[in-house]
Image (cartoon, helix red, strand yellow):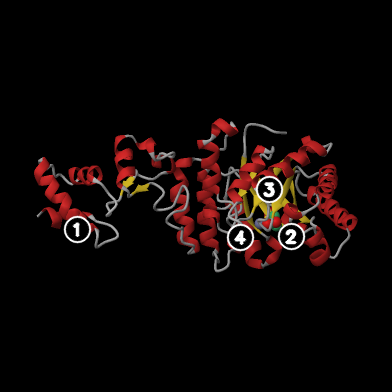
Amino acid sequence: MASNHVDVFDTTLRDGEQSPGVRLNMEQKLKIGHQLVSLGVNIIEAGFPISSPGDFESVNTLARELKGVTICGLTRARDKDIDVAAEALAPAERRRIHTGLGVSENHLQHKLRMSEDQALETGVAAVRRARQYTDDVEYFMEDSGRAKPEYVYRVVEAVIAAGATVVNVPDTTGYTFPTEYRDLIAGIINNVPNSDKAVFSCHCHNDLGMATANTLGGVLGGARQVEVTVNGIGERAGNTSLEEVVIALHIRRDIFGLDTTIQHAKLLETSRMVSELTGMLVQRNKAVVGANAYAHSSGIHQDGVLKERSTYEIIDPTLVGAERSEIILTARSGRHGLKHRLNQLGFDFPTDRFEEVYTKFLEVADTKTEVRDEDLYELVR
Ligand code: KIV
Ligand code: ZN
């Protein structure tokens, strides 16, 4: 079913909200939900309805309020979970039930205490039950990243035959490597006879810092849905970050040749909103949306960027909704950066006077992490 479109499945409100220390109230979830719709995500995983009355209420409210998007609820492979999720999702324009079970030996043995066959039958029964409520059923195979591919193939074939339309291949523990994850997805597509009847989804965690790379590897392997969170928030080291994946797909469309429906210009405002509401700060050097992502402080880089932005920037900051590239004046800055900023502030000095100012600038810069405009005014006085 490989197409040239990748669905963006946002799980900020479910896996993202599982970040230690994060708790969103209904109003905050609704605000983020509306923002995700305007950002252009295709599926919003709104919560895990059976987990608490509050989660039921959130999924139910988002299902009622958000239009033009599929609302998804997570369940374990249990009848009661599925029935409750179906009830919470009932008002949605488009609803998806996301059910599933572990597939790795580790999870089967230590967590589920089931044999492979028992787990497979349980999963198939869950898909059949979910299909009674909706024809959009996603099956997750928890801890696929550490599972035996042959068992994964059996499960995929059985759940698709039972009616799963999307099959999620989570690297739950963030264990895999990009080429390994790509091969896992490609292996499923090539070895499972009915694989053309479903969309395959990447769901990667960031324990080894490779969630984005693994997700992109999965897309190269044939997955056409990516499960992401804004700013990469989530359990432990987090999930794949939405902004990194969609911008990588866009900037490297020469490699992928794939589109998403994301409005790139809303990425920064979305990142800021989620950071503010969750209290999870975005590191300054975070790719795509970090405060330093379009800031240049060394003289060599400033000189290059001021001559031609693309010398040191592969992403135009306006693409993601940032105003412009920033020139940060530090002791590492050169004449070109200083002259540029002084000109912006309305100063244009003859060469000998500029050299005096530059010498003074370096003296001041050696005492500070950044020379700000007020320092420049002081210095030229
Ligand atoms: O990481 C994971 O395996 C999950 C599943 C519940 C989809 O979040
Ligand atoms: Zn997860």
Residue type indicated by callout 1: Glu
Mark 3 Cα shell of 10 Å, populated few (<14), some (14-19), many (≥20): many
Residue 316 position (above or below residue 50): above
Q: Is residue 71 left or right of residue 24?
A: right
Name the residue beneath numbered marker 3.
95
Helix, strand or loop at mark 2:
helix
Mark 1 highlights which residue? 363
Q: Ligand 2: does it lie within 8 Å of the C-beta at label 1?
A: no
Q: Position of residue 235 (x, y in %)?
A: 61, 62
Determine the CA span between mark 4 and mark 3: 14 Å
Q: Name the one closer to the observer, 185 or 97.
A: 185
| Mark carried by residue 84 | 2
Contact between marks 1 and 2 (CB within 8 A): the answer is no
Residue picked out by circle 4: 58
Residue drawn at point x = 77 percent, y = 57 percent:
82
Residue depth check, mark 1 versus mark 2: number of the one nearer the observer = 1
Q: Name the N-terminal-most of marks 4 and 3.
A: 4
Q: Which of marks 2 and 4 precedes in the sequence?
A: 4
